[in-house]
Image (cartoon, grey):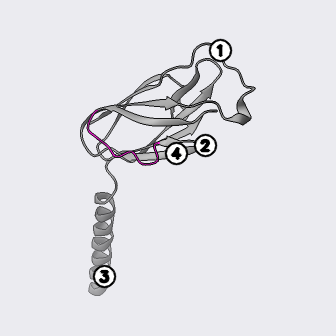
């Protein structure tokens, strides 16, 4: 009977230790996906997850968050950082449908991004939009 109690305590202690180890190694910020989506008015806008599209967007994330940018517009976009703590943008030229790039935000501060859009892909030249194309502005506050 005494051995069973010790075995249960040891098992419970081991389970608690494993649970704490898993929680402490979890990433601080997680991942946020920002999509450049095609729109009939203004051609393209930012969209966080399945949220409402906006040409100018502000988001707040935690330190360590990975931003994933996806280009679902009918034209290529080059992601450009316009201000804030410097990040390394690899694959910033998103030059095909569903192209993506990611960046990890490791410092607190306000990061600003924009894009330099290209010309519509040849397969979409017959699509017309209403009004001038929006200039995209994104501010990311990292706390």
Outermost residue, top direction? 131
Residue in the image at 50% along x and 42% along y: 93
Distance of label 4 from label 2 (alpha carbons): 9 Å
Q: Quadrant of the N terminus?
A: bottom left
Q: Secondary structure at mark 3?
A: helix
How much space separates mark 3 and mark 1, taking CA atoms?
71 Å
The part of the chain drawn in magenta is: 84-92
**Chain-order first, disc 1 or disc 4:** 4
> Magenta stretch containing residue 55, yes or no?
no
Mark 4 or 3: in front is 4
Mark 2 or 3, closer to the camera: 2
**x and y percentages locating residue 87 in the rendered image:** 32, 43
Residue for badge 4: 100
Which labelled disc corresponds to residue 96? 2
Say above or below: 41 vs 69: above
Q: What residue is pinned by disc 1? A: 130
């Amino acid at each position: 009977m005494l051995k069973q109690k010790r075995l249960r305590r040891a098992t419970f202690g081991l389970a608690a230790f494993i649970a704490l180890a898993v929680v402490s190694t979890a990433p601080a910020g997680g991942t946020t996906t920002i999509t450049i989506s095609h729109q009939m008015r203004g051609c393209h806008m930012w969209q966080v997850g399945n949220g409402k599209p906006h040409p100018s967007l502000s988001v707040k994330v935690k330190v360590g968050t990975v931003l994933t940018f996806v280009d679902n517009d009918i034209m290529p976009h080059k992601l450009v950082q316009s201000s804030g703590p410097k990040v390394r943008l690899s694959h910033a030229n998103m030059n095909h449908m569903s192209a993506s790039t990611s960046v990890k935000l490791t410092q607190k501060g306000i990061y600003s991004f924009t894009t330099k859009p290209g010309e519509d892909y040849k397969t979409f030249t017959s699509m017309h939009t209403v009004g001038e194309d929006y200039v995209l502005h994104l501010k990311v506050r990292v706390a």
